[in-house]
Amino acid sequence: MVADSTVLITLAGHAPSAGLLQWRAEEAEICIAVDGGWLAHRHAGVEPDLILGDLDSCGDLQEIEKIFPRSVIERRPDQNQTDFEKALGWLEHRGLPGRVVILGGLGKRTDHCLSNLMITARVDPSVEIIFDDEHEWVRRITPACPLVLSGRADTPISLLPIGEVGEVNSSGLHWELSDADFSWDKLISQSNRCSKDEVKVSCQSGVLYAFVSKEA
């Protein structure tokens, strides 16, 4: 896998619009549909390179092969991992890309959404990780991958930690952060706001997620 490449992973959560999936697929070198995520690809008319998972939510495999004849279908029945973990494991064995964009990873089932965030918290901190849907955009922040956000003045933004996060600093927010230590039992930044068109958020340790609303 090329270090500066982009991989698109489509999960079976809240389905992305056809337009969003088509746009994200155009900028990706590899498209992976995870189990029932293939249905979003069918709706958008975008053939994934790989369909992977235990395939218990896929329906008739012959139908998939007929609709997407060039897709590689890889069944992994191991129930000790989620299908999302299996997809990330597939990537890790081939060398992680510089960027992973995840569709269908938010909404629908809250437990799935939370587990998706916890799973991506474990991925190599140098990888840029983005969750996207019609309502919000979520970006992982690590010491190796700070957030730089452009053109979002007056947009709501929340910063939520996974575990303990040290020395969070920001510029361009309504309520700025300076060497702030985040954790679930100490500090979070809920419903902050972008005060400028360029926002930067960094941390010295841990994993933080920025939730950026797409709604007015």
Image (tube, rainbow, N blue to C red):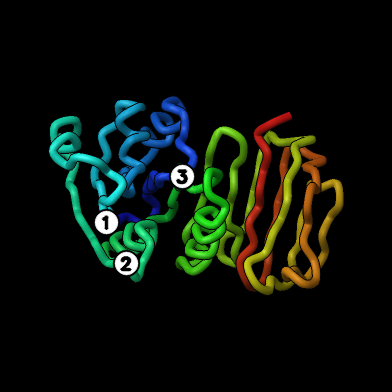
Q: State the separation of the CA atoms marked 1 and 3.
A: 16 Å
Quarter of the image for residue 82 reads: bottom left
Measure how far apart labels 2 and 3 are at the Cα level: 18 Å
- Tell me the residue at 77%/61% (across/down): 188
Image quarter where the N terminus lies is bottom left
In the image, residue 47 sits, relative to residue 163, either above or below, namely above
How crowded is the residue under tag 1: few (<14 C-alpha within 10 Å), some, or many (20+)? some
Please give the residue where the numbered disc 1 appears in the rendered image: 54
- Mark 2 or 3 closer to N-term? 3
Count of picture labels: 3
Q: Are marks 1 and 3 in contact (CB under 8 Å)?
A: no
Residue drawn 75% across and 37% down?
155
Helix, strand or loop status at disc 3: loop
Observer able to see residue 32 = no
Q: Residues within 10 Å of mark 2 (few under 14, many from 20)?
A: few
Q: Which label number is shown at residue 13? A: 3
Residues at marks 2 and 1 touching, judged by CB atoms closer than 8 Å: yes
